[in-house]
Image (cartoon, rainbow, N blue to C red):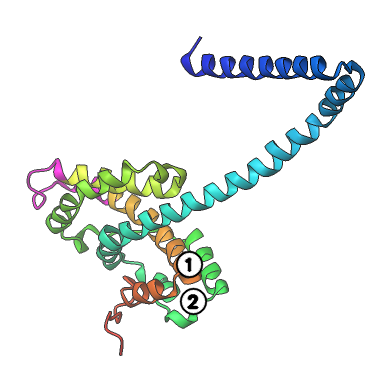
Amino acid sequence: MKEYTRWKVLVGLALVTLTLLLMTVHYLAFHDLHHLGIFFVGDLVFIPVEVLCVTLIIDQLLESREKQQRMEKLNMVIGIFFSRVGTPLLSRLSKADPCTIPMQKELEVSPADWTADRFFQAQASLDVWKCKVDPAGIDRESLRTFLDGNEDFLLRIIENPTVFEHETFTDLILAVTHLTEELKARDDLSTLPPADIAHLEGDMERVYSRLVPEWLKYMEYLKNHYPYLFSLAMRKNPFDPKADVVVR
């Protein structure tokens, strides 16, 4: 028997023994087996309702509250990721997107115009969006240096257990980590054959296709919960060529 199971069995036996002991003390004190039986059966009658209240209602409420707290912590991790890696990386990839003009029209919006309907419209556009990255528009050496400099940061994010509760964000981190490893594995990025460049193009597009939807979801979260952070994020909008962090 496992240690954890043995501990639960011992506690259960101890509680049952304590109940029998208290019932014995009650009988010796009052010599009223009839009422003792009534109380015992009455308690048994309400056990199903008590189980319902504890397991299906109270437990669900506590679990929902705990999940909400975990998601708050996860959104903090996502925010740090975009501040450190996500937004700069998105800026590099979006500039190399040959089809970026239609996407810019959806995402290059002033902060005041980002309403719930506007977010829904942008998400609907992403659902049919075909991402593309032109390798000629990417400075591969600069990209490798940037990702390599943040490799330890990405590993610390992966070590955070809350990350795995967000499947799409986990896929994004793994895609970025894979692209980092691919770039680091090559000695000279300037003399790659066309087949290898096409391979790296696929890795970049995998990152790009996951990065944009996560960015949009995080912007909606900031808009609804932290308007001052949303204001800064919009002033650093990687899809807006006129974006300026300075408030004018």
Q: Residue at x 43, y 79 (%)?
A: 111
- In space, the residues marked 1 and 2 are separated at their CA atoms by 8 Å
Q: Is residue 118 above or below residue 132?
A: below
Residue 104 visible within the image: no
Residue at the right extreme, as displayed: 34
Q: Is residue 85 left or right of residue 127?
A: left
Amino acid type, label 1: Glu
Q: Image point 78% across, 30% down: which residue? A: 47
Residue 18 lies within the magenta run: no
Give the labeled residue for mark 2: 114
Residue 99 picture quarter: bottom left
Furthest residue in direction bottom, as rendered: 248
Residue hosting label 1: 220
Q: Quadrant of the C terminus?
A: bottom left
Q: Residue at x 54, y 70 (%)?
A: 121
Count of numbered circles in the view: 2
Q: Position of residue 237 (x, y in %)?
A: 34, 73
Residue 177 sits above or below residue 221 on the image: above
- Marks 1 & 2, CB-CB < 8 Å contact: yes
Start-end of magenta stretch: 184-201
Tell me the SS state at disc 2. loop
Q: Amino acid type of disc 2?
A: Trp
Q: Could you tell me residue 16's position as x and y percent? A: 68, 17
186 magenta-colored: yes
In the image, 164 versus 28, the foreground residue is 28
